[in-house]
Image (cartoon, rainbow, N blue to C red):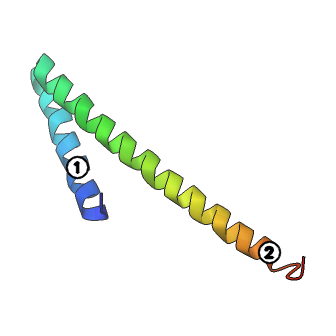
Amino acid sequence: MNPKQFFDKVVELRQTQREYFRTRLPDALRKSKAIEAEIDKEIKRVQQIEAERAKAAADRLQGSLFPDS
């Protein structure tokens, strides 16, 4: 998911949440929770990518201290 798609999904989530709180319909709640799960999954995916990038950067920095080892 790219940043624009993420933004659009969050907008959709907020709309479904407002609909649920306005109507209290079970279907609106179900839809809201499904979108929230998508967003949570995407956040976890991006956090994993960022953690891997940070580890790779740290490994490169650490490796440069003793290049012949």
- Tag 2, which secondary structure? helix
Residue 69, quarter of picture = bottom right
Residue 36 in which image quadrant: top left
Amino acid type, mark 2? Gly
What residue is shown at x 26% (from left), y 29% (from top)?
33
**Residue closest to the eye, 11 or 46:** 46
- Quarter residue 38 falls in: top left
Q: Nearer the viewer, residue 52 or 14?
A: 52
**Residue 45, image x and y in percent?**
44, 50
Q: Name the residue: 32% across, 35% down.
A: 37
Give the label on residue 63, or none.
2
Task: Relative to 10, say whether 19 is above or below.
Answer: above
Q: Which mark is residue 9?
A: 1
Residue sitting at x 20%, y 54%: 8
Query: Three-letter amino acid code at disc 1?
Result: Lys
Image point 12% across, 26% down: which residue? 22
Looking at the image, residue 32 sits to the left or right of residue 63; the answer is left
* Crowd rating for badge 1 (residues with CA inside 10 Å; few <14, some 14–19, many 20+): some
User: How many numbered marks are there?
Assistant: 2
Residue 42, image x, y percentages: 37, 48
Q: Is residue 21 left or right of residue 52?
A: left
Q: Residue furthest front?
A: 69
Of the numbered discs 2 and 1, the one sitting upstream in the chain is 1
Quadrant of the rendering where the N terminus is positioned: bottom left
Q: Secondary structure at mark 1?
A: helix
- Distance from Cα at disc 2 to Cα at disc 1: 40 Å
Q: Closest to the observer: 3 or 69?
A: 69
